[in-house]
Amino acid sequence: MNNLSKKNGEMKIPFLDVGATYNDLKQEIDETVQRVLDSAWYILGNELEIFEREFAEYCGVKYCIGVGSGLEALSLVLRAWGVKAGDEVIVPAHTFIATWLAVSHVGATPIPVEVDESSFNINPKLIEQAITKKTKAIIPVHLYGQSASMLEIKKIAAAFGINVLEDAAQSHGAKYGNKKTGSLGNAAAFSFYPGKNLGAFGDGGAITTNDKRLGETVRMLRNYGSKKKYIHGNIGYNSRLDEIQAAILRVKLRHLDSWNSQRRKIAEYYINNIKNEGIILPFWSGTNDHVFHLFVIKCMNRHNVEQQLTKAGIQTIIHYPVPPHKQDAYTAYNKIRLSITEHLSSQVLSLPMGPHLGIDAVKYICSVINSL
Ligand SMILES: *Cc1c(COP(=O)(O)O)cnc(C)c1O
């Protein structure tokens, strides 16, 4: 161990302090939860309705529909579009597996397209050659919080008459030009899993769109395929964002922009201060097209970096160690070669990141990395 980490021997830095946002807003959140409990109305009520309005407005779209999770948000849109067995949907090869699972859940086939090595996002230049007569949609993921190349993607989609579903599970508040992610495709799916930039204290998700009919269909599908109580026009689901989570999200939404700018400040500090030849820093334009859900570096010798950071009390996570096409869930894909994705999965390492990460901790992390 070097001197610095000895000196800071007591330092323990968690990857993400999820509880910190609660501690910050404890009184307001406690009162909010109490209010919902006292209201005796827990599913599909006022809180959800108001949150849906507020989040639609935040994203700059007409409609928001709260659902049970990010995965369900993705699959409900595909289902509402009528995507089914025999259809194909283009997905990034390098993503959290839920992007693929949503496609599989409606019976369609995920068609992986390689990502750009420096932005980690789907490479628009490779999309066109993956399109066939069966292609029904493209799901770009704004991975790690940075918006995908939506202009190019939308051009291709328009030329082939296919839909674009943004996977915005990691990009709440990120912009693309002057528009927010969630307002760029034909629809978008958000997750409110506790660790996301806007996280509930349980599972949750939402769909945003300007398409009125799609919004109505998803609204019906999330509630047993019913528009009117006990009248079922569709074989629907039970996938709803509950009142307590919606009320908590309303409180947290008011802090999202300042939390995101705090994340950008930390990223800027990492980028300006990490100096190690064995490490490649993430590409960032320097604008608010990135909300740094994760700060992901690439390491020539990841095992060593990981071990040394652990020794120094710094927790890191790999997003993601096994790509979807190498998982047992997708054995039919196991032999496909996706070299960029496979390479990334062997190099990426996520450093601690979150609005409550103190600058002292960030300085310490940089100095440990620079001493390797
Ligand atoms: C978290 C995540 C999801 C799934 O969201 P859940 O709410 O956990 O179901 C989907 N896509 C991406 C890229 C994610 O990071």
Image (cartoon, helix red, strand yellow):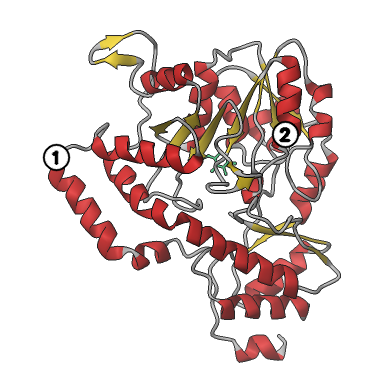
Disc 1 designates what residue? 40
Q: Quadrant of residue 360?
A: bottom right
Q: Is residue 99 left or right of residue 257?
A: right
Q: Quadrant of residue 87?
A: top right
Whether 254 is drawn above or below 213: the answer is below
**Is residue 336 shown to the viewer in this render?**
no
Q: Amino acid at mark 1?
A: Ala
Q: Indicate the position of residue 84 as horizontal and vertical percent values.
A: 58, 13
- Residue annotated with mark 2: 151
Residue 325 falls in which quadrant of the image?
Answer: top right
Query: The C terminus appears in which quarter of the rendering?
Result: bottom right
- Please determine whether, in this image, residue 12 is positioned above or below residue 103: below
The residue depicted at 62 percent of the width and 18 percent of the height is 108
Secondary structure at badge 2 equals helix
- Residue drawn at x 57%, y 36% as measured from the top left: 98
Residue nearest the viewer, comparing 52 with 75: 52
Kind of residue sitting beneath label 2: Leu
Q: Is residue 311 above or below residue 54?
A: below
**Residue occupying the point 50% across, 53% down:** 197
Which of the two labelled residues, at mark 2 and mark 1, occupies the earlier sequence position?
Answer: 1
Q: Quadrant of the N terminus?
A: bottom right
Relative horizontal placement of residue 175, taking residue 273 as reference (left or right): left
- Residue shown at the point (27%, 60%) measured from the top left: 28
Residue 363 shows up from this direction? yes
Disc 2 versus disc 1: nearer the observer: 2
Decide if residue 347 is on the left or right side of residue 83: right
Instruction: Residue 2: give x, y in percent of width and height.
Output: 72, 87
